Amino acid sequence: MLTNHRLPRRRLLQVGFLGGLGLSLADYLRMANASTMRPKADACIFVHLKGGPSHLDTLDMKLEAPVDERGEFQRIQTVIPGYEVCEHLPRLATLIDRFTLIRGISHAAGAHPLANEYLFTGNRPSPAVVYPAMGSVSAKELQIPSAIPPFVAIPNSDMSAGFLGVGYGSFKTTSVPKPGQPFEVRGLAVANGLTIEKIKSRNELLRDLDQTFRTAEANSPVLDGLDQFAKKANEMILSDRARLAFDVSHESPAVLKLFEKDDTSQALLLAGRLVEHGVRFVTVTHDGWDTHLDNFANHKNKLLPPFDAGITSLVRMLELKGLLDRVLIVATGEFGRTPTINKQAGRDHWPRTMWTLVAGGGAKQNFFLGATDKKGHTPTDDTKLKPDDLAATIYHALGIDPRTEYFTSSGRPVLLVPEGNVMQDLFA
Amino acid sequence: MSHAFCHLRRVQFGALLICLAFCMPMFAASEDAVRPPLSERFATDSAEGTLHETPNFQRHVVTLLGRLGCNGRSCHGSFQGRGGFRLSMFGYDFEQDHQALLSGDPARVNPKQPNDSLILLKPTNADEHEGGERFDKNGWEARVLRAWIAGGAKNDAEQAGQLLRIEVTPHEMVFRQASQRVPMRVVAVWSDGTREDVTCLTRFSSNDDDVAEVSDTGLVTSKGKGDTHIVATYDNAVDSTPVMMPVTDRVDEKYPTVATPTRIDELIVNKLRKLGVVPSEVCTDVEFLRRVSLDIAGTLPTPQQVRDFVSDASPDKRANKIDELLETPAYALWWTTKFCDVMGLNGPLQLGNTEFGPIVTEQWRSWLERKVRENQPYDKIVEGMVVVVSRRPDQAYEDFALQMTQYVLAKNPVDFTARDTMPHFWFRGNLATADDKALAFAYTFMGVRLDCAQCHKHPFDRWSQQDFKQFAAIFERVKGGISPESKPAYDKLRADLGVPDKLNTAAIRRQTYWRLAAEGKMVPWPEVFIARDAKPDGAQPKLLGDAEIDLAKVDDPRRPLMDWLRKRDNPYFARALVNRFWAHYFGRGIVEPADDLNLGNPPSNPELFDALTAAFIEHGYDMKWLHREITRSAAYQRSWRTNDTNRNDDRNFSRAMIRRLPAEVAVDAMLMATGNTKLADGFATTMKDRRIGVQATADLTRTEFSLAVFGKPLRNINCDCEREQQPSLAQAIFVRNDQDLHAMLGRKDGWLAELTKEKDLDVPARRDELIHLAYLRVLSREPGDRELTRARQHFESAASDPLDGLRDLLWVLLNTQEFITNH
């Protein structure tokens, strides 16, 4: 917030000069485009299935796969005729017609950190620059109500603000609500014997004692930044607005009873509440999908039940509130898993294909985008979807031009998602 | 010295020798031999029956297109081109550009009908052109292009020859008021002896247009007070001219007497005198003690140290304190972390095959820490990391594996840190290709960012893509893994050990190997080696801006690379370190950003940069000498309090810049200020649990919450900027209300817990002493009278008991701007 990532002045002059057309026209064109582009969604809930779910055992099951690749799960019929999913996703089977299923996003990053960064930024990771994750870009580009953090991670996330700087990083809850209890979030809870009165009395003492740099002119951008953020922090801590936004216990019984008691469901309940209170980007990390060991037992017992319950509850919650149209829900891992089952009944990393589940925010219902071959090894169609396209699509839905130009702190010009194309077919 | 340095800046380094020998006489004698600019030679149509000369493609056409902006990145220089026409970005790929102009349908150049060429029609708006009108169809630019086309539109590379340098005049501009104008002149000197005025083909830019603006034609207009540079770019040469307007009229003879106790101060005040800027006063003893303790040792002084230092009457006490701090273990720990940031030691999972990553990481770190502690010369340390393979040439793989195992034995392991060499830099997981290695090497050891030149001509420096390719070729043979000659023994070892490859996770393999190694068994260690089968079609390795390396004569191209770095006149190696140290102490490099040494980004004080670098080399790359030299200067010891002349100075070191504490230092300071007396007193000597020694994990969620909030670098990229120095909302919330901050105040080994045993806390004298101690612990100074009174008042009226009051006071002091900054 102290630096303008769009236009560092010295570089602007040089680049503008070298650029012939100059930036003003390009900026103008971009702004002109932006004004005709009405956002499809006000917020995004990005559910990261960290580790990479087994696409073949969940939403992209293959009748014709070889026996030794097929796995042990049975298929069940969904509300969409002819489409079957894993037996351990019964709720999704009845609600799958609210979603678009994207099959066949494909890339070549086979390690978690690289694949995650690629997924979160829409840019292949580079040692030259850390691109900002979608949540940080949303925090920078979108308006938010005062005292509300623009970008929240539940309970935390590897999404990095990259060259935008920590000022645009996620606000991490570091915990999830416990069912039936008030929820207070890290940094905002008035706990440990503190009261608002106590905080106010400390603030008065702070105001009177923090005078050193008022005794002489220091002319320091660091001090300006400290002033500015102290004011915002006090706003958030002292007003009830942010605390209310996080406290899911204020939801109506009708909403609360939609959600199961597991952490993922509760995290998604919190996500749904936060977007209603003005948070623009929420990422929920559902960890544990890296099933090199006991793929099936883990999916069956630990992973699928909370995912199945949580994601369907979230859709129903937003439907109940009439918000589904304005909130884009995206659930995805960083890659799929190998068709071959290893000796430990596990499946390994398979970035060649994966699935991504999308709902709300103007996305079509009852729709399939892309497809994989009969064995589920490879995307079949020629859409050639990549993580770049997913990021471009999410930005587009939020009304952020994926070709927005930023400057890194070294003055290097970069486009938000230079190689991603918006999946126009996704939207109704 | 400063005289020679002027030349160094003005010329290209590659042409240094020639220039030092001939530059001055040539410059004086051959002034009249300079060819007038194209804008004059082509000012009018050629007379009837005569022809204009034929312009040269490299010298005139490409540079003209560059000057007109045609090959900029938002026009035809972009990777997609524009309107079906693509030029190399910033123009240094002459063959490609020539082809682009002559091919295409229709071609941009029409040698049969020069006047119908699109490169004449479009930029003059005679044909539709998204980029608008770039020049007048009756102007000299049109005549130049027309004459080149009429002359056959050739890429006469041989005729162009090599650009030796550009000479930019005037060498310095000092303005007295706004709106004064001075034209710049640029003369190109080519290898065939041609000297040509190329002002009209040069791209100019100002590094700060609040101070001076420059027009397309090189006319400089003063705008405001301060100093900056005008940068001129022609062909692949870049040069700059300092421009200034004094801030006050207290310049030259009117300048007050300012003490300059060190050479650094002389050189800084020399510049300040020209600018009419008077430096701030020297800071107080307590300010100095806190600043230097945090900077050198990453550690707050203890209350006792503050009191001792204030009462110390010796005149050398500041110098003595510097010496003392440089001998603390905290110094070695903190500066090792700083080095590891720049060297990219980024987490166990990214290093040396997943099985051995954690071992490799700790070997690297502790090896470096020992060298820093023992103050090994910097060039020796780097040599030990750079010119190194894992296995001696005469060593069998089995012997090497056994040797590596000796370092990790459960009982009496051999000390890895005693080695002279440490190859692990080359194991970095993100240095897979020669390009990656070149980018990281240039960043780490040379302070140069080459990523632009990886794909196109560097827009602010002289590097072309060819320069980058040849530099990267140095690293083509360097590999981390298993060499072909080790492969059979390695495979056999793995097979004999019977640890299956597919032993599902690396974690299980790792534990198995570690257990075996700790028992003294051979395990399959990876190695850094030189591949013999270098790509035959690869680029010829070449030192950056210097000589080529003959691979027939050297086994390991890193040897000549290291020799080159060590040369006294190497423009990068020692400079990069000096500049980074300087930036650490001043919050700003002499070149800023500190890791961006490039010709378009000149030093704010070249004489200072030059002298300090030369002296550092003179002192045998002695890092402690450099720490001392910088911290003993009056410049480092200045107050942050500004005066009327230096309020806006942020580049000439006339005042202390207020800096936010680095993440690790900030968290340590909170832990120390709130810790019990024993813990706090041991902070500078007991390194266990010190955050200044915590290694990066490359992963945000694996980084301690507080360190992540304050921006500890993950070491994933080649940029000093990865260490976040700015304040943020999350930091403000952390210090106010995070559970970790509350836990620090309330913890069992905390100061408040220690005091619960005391009975006389509400005795006024003891209470006052506690207020003093709180100030000393957090702000490293005694409270002033007003502060003491206000704190007492809080204890009396707003706190339930003395401990409650003290908790409030500690919280308040931790939340002051004075605490979270180094000032």
Image (spheres, rainbow, N blue to C red):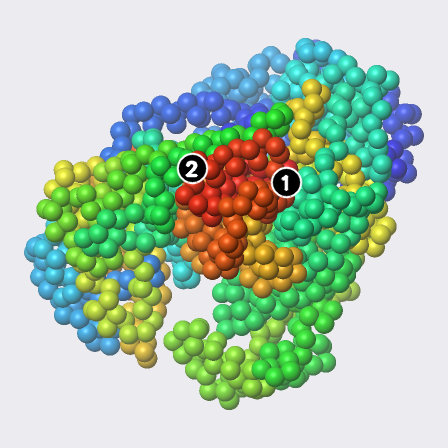
Q: Are marks 2 and 1 in contact (CB under 8 Å)?
A: no
Q: Position of residue A37 (x, y in %)?
A: 29, 29
Q: Amino acid at mark 1?
A: Glu
Q: Secondary structure at mark 1?
A: loop
The relative height of residue B176 versus residue A426 in the rendered view (above or below) is above
Which residue occupies the foreground of this view, A239 or B163?
A239
Q: Secondary structure at mark 2?
A: loop
Which residue occupies the foreground of this view, A33 or B470?
A33
Marks 2 and 1: same chain?
yes
Image quarter of residue B292: top right
Read off the residue under disc 1. Answer: B782
Mark toward the start of the polypeptide (2 vs 1): 1
Q: Residue at left 17%, top 44%? A: A251
Q: Position of residue B640 (x, y in %)?
A: 67, 32
The relative height of residue A74 versus residue A181 in the rendered view (above or below) is below
Indicate the quadrant containing the C terminus of chain A: top left, top right, bottom left or bottom right. Answer: top left
The relative height of residue B666 versus residue B51 in the rendered view (above or below) is below
Q: Position of residue A34 (x, y in %)?
A: 34, 27
Q: Residue at left 67%, top 51%? A: B304
Q: Is residue A143 left or right of residue B792?
A: left
Q: Is residue B655 left or right of residue B347?
A: right
Give the class, few, some or many, for how many residues have Cα within 10 Å of label 1's Cα (few <14, many ≥20).
Answer: many
Read off the residue under disc 2. Answer: B798
Q: Is residue B523 left or right of residue A203?
A: right
Q: Amino acid at mark 2?
A: Ala
In this rendering, does residue A420 appear at all?
A: no
Looking at the rendered structure, which numbered label has been put on residue A69? none
> Label 1 is found on which chain of the structure?
B
Q: Residue at left 57%, top 53%? A: B672
State the separation of the CA atoms marked 2 and 1: 22 Å
Which residue occupies the foreground of this view, A47 or B772?
B772
Q: Is residue B303 left or right of residue B241?
A: left
